[in-house]
Image (cartoon, rainbow, N blue to C red):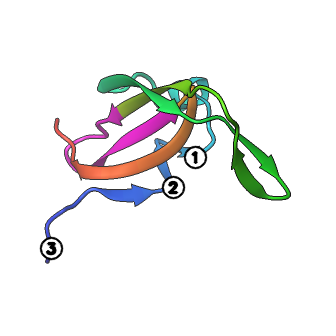
Amino acid sequence: MGLAMPGKAEAFRCGNKLVVEGDTAGAVLAKCGQPAEITRKVIQRPPVIWRYGRPYRVPGGDLEVMVEFWVYNLGSNKFMRRVRLEDGEVTAIETLGYGYP
């Protein structure tokens, strides 16, 4: 049996509601309530346009993107979840170790 390592998930349940990539911050709050922990940072990202299904970098300055990490403690018998939000939209969901009471 291996150790519990952080893993990537595409969705998780809060009660009977499903949180998925693409949900807004407001939708996650409505489904799960306030997270146990929030971390914020700003990253720089080059502007990109999509043409014929391919990304092309636009010359000029980088854009600032607000990134938040919300950790949900679902209890000591369930795994915690870390939700990454970029500009208020869920872009990734990670499975962490077991929660705490």
Residue placed under numbered mark 2 in the picture = 10
Q: Is residue 100 left or right of residue 25?
A: left
Q: CA distance from mark 1 to mark 2?
A: 6 Å
Do the numbered discs 3 and 1 sit on residues whose CB atoms are within 8 Å? Answer: no
Q: Is residue 97 above or below residue 46?
A: below
Q: x and y percent of residue 23 in the render? A: 62, 37
Is residue 6 part of the magenta span, yes or no?
no
Q: CA distance from mark 3 to mark 2?
A: 22 Å
Disc assigned to residue 21: 1
Q: x and y percent of residue 32 in the render? A: 47, 31
Q: CA distance from mark 3 to mark 1?
A: 27 Å
Look at label 2 and name its amino acid. Glu
The quarter of the displayed image where residue 67 is located: top left
N-terminal of the pair, mark 1 or mark 2, is: 2
Residue at 14% from the left image edge and 77% from the top image edge: 1
Q: Is residue 90 above or below residue 6?
A: above
Q: Which residues are magenta?
A: 71-85
Is residue 72 part of the magenta span, yes or no?
yes
SS at circle 3: loop
Do the numbered discs 1 and 2 sit on residues whose CB atoms are within 8 Å? Answer: yes
